[in-house]
């Protein structure tokens, strides 16, 4: 079982709880099965707030745009996000003013 907070594969069971040795997160196995049945409920920002389609988020650090010399500056507000199932970890689809359509990882945004 992977850690729901940092996705580490080194989590272990300790009594009735699961423990992640990398981020020290503890959770119950029952809570993890409910999150696994609803993929949208599992998408959370850097502070642990649940994200939903149509939310606005703020980028928390400068992000380089792959294949371009442009940069998305930290503090940029992104409106009307869409949650996606990206196999590469990019689980937010959005349009950013001045850059265009792109995908973001939820670990680099906070809910506005």
Image: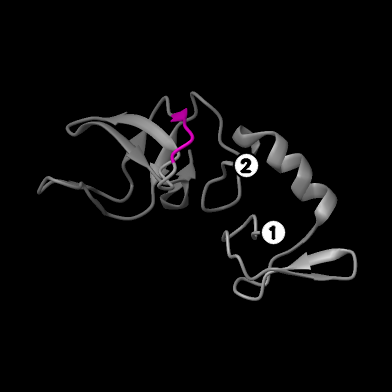
Q: Quadrant of residue 101?
A: top left
- Mark 1, residue position: 1
Q: Helix, strand, or loop for circle 2?
A: helix
Q: Is residue 46 left or right of residue 63?
A: right
Q: Helix, strand, or loop for circle 1?
A: loop
Q: Is residue 14 left or right of residue 26?
A: right
Asked if marks 2 and 1 touch (Cβ < 8 Å), the reply is no
Q: Above or below — where is 10 with respect to 89?
A: below
Q: Residues within 10 Å of mark 2 (few under 14, many from 20)?
A: some
Colouring scheme applied when the structure was drawn: one colour
Report the magenta residues as a range: 82-86
Instruction: Tell me which residue sits at (84%, 49%) in the image.
Output: 30
Query: Looking at this rendering, what residue extends furthest in the bottom direction?
Result: 21
Disc ID at residue 42: 2
Q: Position of residue 71 (x, y in %)?
A: 19, 48
Q: Position of residue 64 (x, y in %)?
A: 22, 52
Q: Is residue 77 left or right of residue 57?
A: left
Q: Above or below — where is 99 with respect to 89?
A: above
Q: Main secondary structure of the magenta part?
A: loop
Q: How many marks?
A: 2
Q: Is residue 104 left or right of residue 53?
A: left
Instruction: Tell me which residue sits at (69%, 59%) in the image.
Output: 1
* Pair 2/1: label in front: 1
Query: Looking at this rendering, what residue extends furthest in the right direction?
Result: 15
**If you read the primary sequence from the N terminus, does the residue marked by circle 2 or circle 1 appear first?**
1
Instruction: Tell me which residue sits at (37%, 42%) in the image.
Output: 104
Q: Is residue 111 magenta?
A: no
């Amino acid at each position: 079982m992977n850690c729901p907070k940092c996705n580490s594969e080194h989590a272990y069971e300790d009594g009735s709880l699961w423990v992640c040795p990398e981020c020290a997160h503890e959770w119950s196995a029952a809570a993890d099965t409910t999150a696994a049945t609803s993929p949208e409920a599992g998408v959370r920002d850097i502070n642990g707030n649940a994200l939903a389609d149509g939310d606005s988020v703020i980028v928390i650090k400068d992000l380089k745009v792959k294949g371009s010399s442009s940069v998305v500056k930290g503090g940029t507000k992104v409106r009307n996000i869409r949650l996606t199932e990206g196999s590469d970890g990019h689980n937010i689809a959005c349009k950013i003013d001045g850059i265009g359509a792109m995908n973001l990882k939820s670990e680099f945004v906070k809910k506005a």
